[in-house]
Image: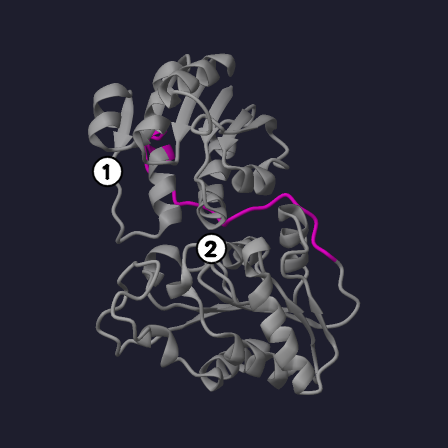
Amino acid sequence: MKILIILPNWLGDALMATPAIEHLCTKYPDARLTFVGSFVSIEALKYHPKVDASFVDDTKKEGWRLKNTQTFAQSLGEFDIAISFRNNIFSTLMLVFTPAHVKIARKSWHASWLLDKTAKLSPKDHLSIQYNNLVNLLEETPIEPPSSKLYIDKYDYETPTLGINPGATYGSAKRWYPDKFAEVAKAFSPEYKIIIFGGPGEVEMGNDIEKRLQDMGISNYENLAGKTNIKELCARIGGLDIFVTNDSGPMHVAAAFEVPTVAIFGPTRHLETCQWKNESSSIVRRDDVICAPCMKRTCPLKHHECMTKIEASDVIEEVKKLIN
């Protein structure tokens, strides 16, 4: 059973698609997978044992994207099933140009017109449920999505370790503040080594926290902001004893490894993108900020109260609950 899967672009969304991928592999034990996705999503998921091939989708980089999409799709070969977890016309066209017996995507004007099976998905459902509902189009009776899954070995820390992740690639509105992350790190530094995480664009933020920890006299930390590739990032998060993070891709990495996690939510819909089936996790958010969730990359009202009103003490208390 050859299955083509077009992955979501964002790391977190790709992780939230893994329950649907596991559902496919359970339904078809002989499945052989081909992944197409962004560099980030491919680097995280290409280690799945049923993956035969994985390709970074570069069709929009040079030349005419429509022709690039056609050429790329036709180079992939033939499939029994082709499914897209993206929701744009070019992912639909990629399925159109790919020889496959069954083609599946989210319901839209283009997918409904051009593909075999589509499903109307609701943002009131968790994104893992939405993705899984696409696979349920192949079932006579709907199946509940399993847990998230990563096939990357955990890093083995020598001492109890707490990770903090102050970044969020989507935009500044999702980011809690470096001074407050530093306060959380300080509170637990006597018992835990502190790891500062961050992507290439978050080095300055990581350095800010590092400087604050130094000023507090804290030395048992490691600043990994901008210093890990995707596989190393996942492994390092997977080995943590506890994790404090914004709503972000690394939060979903932690969920796949079932790392105890406190996640800080501001402008995003926590019911749609919270940690999927991570029993040792909690969310810190303000219910009294009426403009949240606005789903904006930056605060349109300039006050950012969905994040400024969350105090370090709120997060520290949630971490203590998970530890206990």
Query: Residue at label 2?
Result: 169
**Looking at the image, is 43 positioned above or below residue 80?**
below
Label 1 amino acid? Answer: Lys
- Distance from label 1 to label 2 (Cα)? 27 Å
Tell me how the rendering is colored.
Answer: one colour
**Looking at the image, is 252 positioned above or below residue 165?**
above
**Rendered location of residue 235, percent (x, y):** 67, 53
Question: Residue at the spot x=62%, y=52% of the render?
Answer: 234
**Looking at the image, is 312 positioned above or below residue 28?**
below
Q: Can residue 164 be seen here?
A: no
Give the class, few, some or many, for how many residues have Cα within 10 Å of label 1's Cα (few <14, many ≥20).
few
Q: Nearer the viewer, residue 301 or 84?
A: 301
Q: Taking 261 as reference, is 124 left or right?
A: left
Magenta residue span: 135-155
**Rendered location of residue 50, percent (x, y):** 60, 30
Question: Residue at the spot x=48%, y=83% of the render?
Answer: 312
Q: Nearer the viewer, residue 121 or 230?
A: 230
Query: Residue at label 1?
Result: 120
